[in-house]
Amino acid sequence: MTKSSTVNQECAAFKPQKLIQSERSNSRVDVDQINAFLESSPERRDQAQALIQEIVKDPILKTDSSMYDRSKREERAVTARKIARLALYMEHDIKTARKHFKGNDLIEDLQRDTESKLPALSNKDLSIFDRRLSLLHNIDPQLGTRVGVHLGLFGNCIKGNGTNEQIHYWLQERGSSFMKGIYGCFGMTELGHGSNVARLQTKATYNPDSDTFTLLTPNLPATKFWIGGAANSATHCSVYARLIVEGKDYGVKTFVVPLRNPETFQLLPGIAIGDIGHKMGRNGIDNGWIQFHNVVIPREYMLSRFTQVIPSKAPNGKATVKTQPQLDQISGYSALLSGRVNMVMDSFRFGSKFAIIGARYAVGRQQFAKPKQPETQLIDYPLHQYRVLPQIAVPYLVSPVAFKLMDQYYSILDELYKVSSPATFDKTGLAIVSKKLKNLFIDSASLKATNTWLVAELIDQLRQSCGGQGYSSYNAFGKGYDDWVVQCTWEGDNNILSLSSAKSILKKFAASRRGVFDRSLDSGSFDYLEPSFVRAVLTGQETASLRQLQDYTKVWAIALVKFLDHIARLIDVTKDLDSVAKLLVLVSKFHSLHSMLQAYYEKLKNPQDSHVTDAASEAALWDIYKLFSLYFIDKHSGEFQQFKVFTPDQISQTVQPKLLELLQKVRKSIIPLTDAFKLPDDMINAPIGYFDGDIYHNYFSEIIKQNPAEADGAGVPPNADLFTRLLARGSEFDHALGGSPRSEIIERLGK
């Protein structure tokens, strides 16, 4: 990069490169081992690094600082080009997974396989591309979302609700899984309803005489709204609409509705679509609104894995509706489950990026000094350590639980398809999978809400810690925050998700108080609800301490039991669940923090799972674990004292001193700990956070590149004529009134 600065690198106040390199040289932490821990395994680490290099070196997919100055129109055009490029990588990744590069074209053969003679596409076939998309989300979240809407929401809606034949037809034969043939969007949210899916108003009325459905938007609030891909790209939509058969409302079901002719992109009859306009962030996503005016689709376009409309065989007979009550309600949220699981992984990846920027700036930037002393690095101020280091711990604690949740998601979905398929239908198995799905909903809702909130806070806190440079668009924080915070709202508003999760946890707690606990299903993230542990906590036999490593997780289990007991007693009196909503949101957050600490602890304590054999690296990772727990205990010290988990003296004499001690320890490894995220400069895209640490040259050069001095060659700034007239104006005000600015005239008029 061209250096465009007059800064003297020998000046005592400006040597960030030397400071950052010194931290690397003096560290005994093994960055590669820690990266393997963060990426779940050496194999996943190597694959992630290979994919990152492919992304940042691709001339279409890469990003640079020009992205910060683009208009909405430019964002849309760039994103469309990237989607086209990404589709080619998808085909390549599927062929790589199947090791099929010879003979007939695999993708063409899969699309022509109308009789399902070839092995159907599996999660394993898509695993490489899924990881590529996850990594791309970090460098260009609007691209990740726009493709994710098609594959993750539209595609998973079909996977979760369609029969095997429908899944094969829409995703494979029609080419949706390859981003060929058709392009989908996800039509759940309406202008008048978001989180309350059960009250959506779009109607799908069955027509027995033609064996079709008529889709209708009955009023303005029923307009499908915020639909990513609808404005410009989608040819089809997975529509959530009320199933009306023979005048009876069977609730909200899912339908595939064509929107545009894929060859001409002309809207089909009865379809009205528009763009919802400029947003706070992610303007490369073409969010739109959709209205249906008596749109007719075949009955077969209703996704019918758990609910089927069966036409009458008798003339003038009535159609019947057959449903699987165990999974019908859950199936309506199946697509959102994928999004929530992925947003936990996004929290790890996105948080890592800003942790790197904040750490490198904190080490390289110096500010204030005693007489004749060099200026102090920001990170050496205790307050700055408190502001920065716990934020760096956040993505560390997210990583293990994110990979665990993702693996559970794919495992449970595979079970679901097996037990609900006609050829292998298993009623008992279906009941078990239903319970597993409900637990996954609780965990994913809690973790999605808590971690998207945590990363929003992380971005904002680290932006502030970078001072004025953090406010510059070219240092990523502004766009990063605008792009990120939508995660706190979409696919379930975080407060609503937290309430839903906590209410389910409260039910499990009530069952535990009666001695009911399903060890086969709940002994993971809900092990704190095991009846003997609950009794021990409530009778004072089990108390909080911080003597052993496991205690830093157990303290949250104890807090949860006491918190839940308090809420249950309040409800016993008030009989009003809504009156404790504020407390329930905290239950969800505490459950999430406990799950994160538990997953981290279980991974790190097992060398075969952690892949960390170096003593210094393991010690640094345990320090991160303890710092995370202590920081949030301190943040929630009011609740910990209120419910007598800790006394005020324990907070002030144990928790807070340990926290300050850990800040000093973690500070020594701040650069290698953030280097361990292994994100190249092209993915960070913030000059104050580049690897070489040359903060001032890098940042100033970026400014000059994007804002050339005297761009018009004449040295005259834009709008100079306006300012010239402004500064040269006369006394128009006085002349207009017939007066004069001379004092003797003003004095005479005042007599």
Image (tube, grey):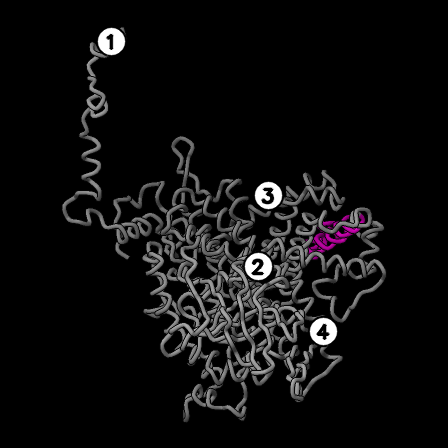
Within 10 Å of disc 4 (Cα), the crowding (few <14, some 14-19, many 20+) is: some
Separation of marks 1 and 2 at Cα, in angstroms: 68 Å
| Nearest to N terminus: mark 1 or mark 3 | 3
Q: In the image, what residue type sits under mark 1?
A: Glu
- Predominant SS of the magenta segment: helix
**Residue that sits furthest to the top in the current view:** 751
Q: Which of the two residues, 745 or 349, is positioned nearer the viewer here?
A: 745
Say which residue label 2 marks: 194
Separation of marks 4 and 3 at Cα, in angstroms: 51 Å
Within 10 Å of disc 1 (Cα), the crowding (few <14, some 14-19, many 20+) is: few
| Nearest to N terminus: mark 2 or mark 4 | 2
Q: In the image, what residue type sits under mark 4?
A: Gln
Q: Nearer the viewer, mark 4 or mark 3?
A: 4
The residue at 78%/58% (across/down) is 509
Say which residue label 1 marks: 747
| Nearest to N terminus: mark 3 or mark 2 | 2
Is label 3 in contact with label 2 (beta carbons under 8 Å)? no
Q: Is residue 613 in view from this perspective?
A: no
Q: For residue 591, what is the image quadrant? A: bottom right
